[in-house]
Image (cartoon, rainbow, N blue to C red):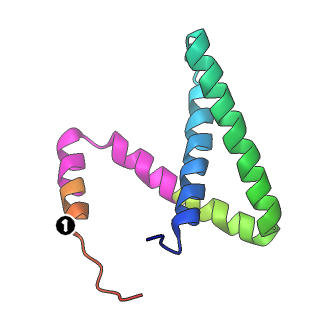
Amino acid sequence: MTEKNDFSKFVLFVKGVIESGWVIKNSGRKLNNEAKMHFNRLLNDATQFEKYIHKEMGPEMASYEDDVNSSVIHFVWRLFDLPAKEREEFLEYINRFETHSQE
């Protein structure tokens, strides 16, 4: 069964590839030749896909989508940076969370 927001979730992860990719690219980290080839291809393809999606959405929706996705990605980055014990406790809390809405 496909959820109605599956494509939006996919676009979020594409944005995560782009933001994370640029952080790595600008960090000066050296990748071996094969890893660099795959990394650059993935970053380029994700960037081209995002440009296409934004063109189809129009500037206003693209800006809104970009703001929401960037916020979610930054939240995930902060989660990764938590001390291990805090991260584990937070993930346990999230895994126990249940929504009560019936969409």
Q: Residue furthest top?
A: 32
Q: Secondary structure at mark 1?
A: helix
Image height of 99 relative to 67, above or below = below
Magenta segment range?
72-90
Q: Residues within 10 Å of mark 1 (few under 14, many from 20)?
A: few
In the image, what residue type sits under mark 1? Arg
User: Which quadrant is the N terminus positioned in?
Assistant: bottom left
> Toward the viewer: 40 or 63?
40
The reply to whether the magenta stretch includes residue 77 is yes
> Toward the viewer: 71 or 47?
47
Q: Is residue 79 left or right of residue 37?
A: left
Image height of 26 relative to 69, above or below = above
> Toward the viewer: 102 or 97?
102
Image x and y of residue 96, in percent: 19, 67
Q: Main secondary structure of the magenta part?
A: helix
Q: Residue at point 65% right, 60% down?
A: 66
Q: Is residue 73 left or right of residue 52?
A: left
Image x and y of residue 31, in percent: 56, 14
The reply to whether the magenta stretch includes residue 42 is no
Q: Residue at point 61% right, 10% down?
A: 33
**Where on the picture, by quarter, is residue 24?**
top right
Image height of 25 relative to 19, above or below = above
Image height of 6 relative to 36, above or below = below
Q: Residue furthest bottom?
A: 102
Q: Residue at point 29% right, 85% down?
A: 100
User: Which quadrant is the C terminus positioned in?
Assistant: bottom left
**Where on the picture, by quarter, is residue 36?**
top right
Residue 26 seen in render: no
Image x and y of residue 16, in percent: 55, 47
The residue that label 1 is drawn on is 96
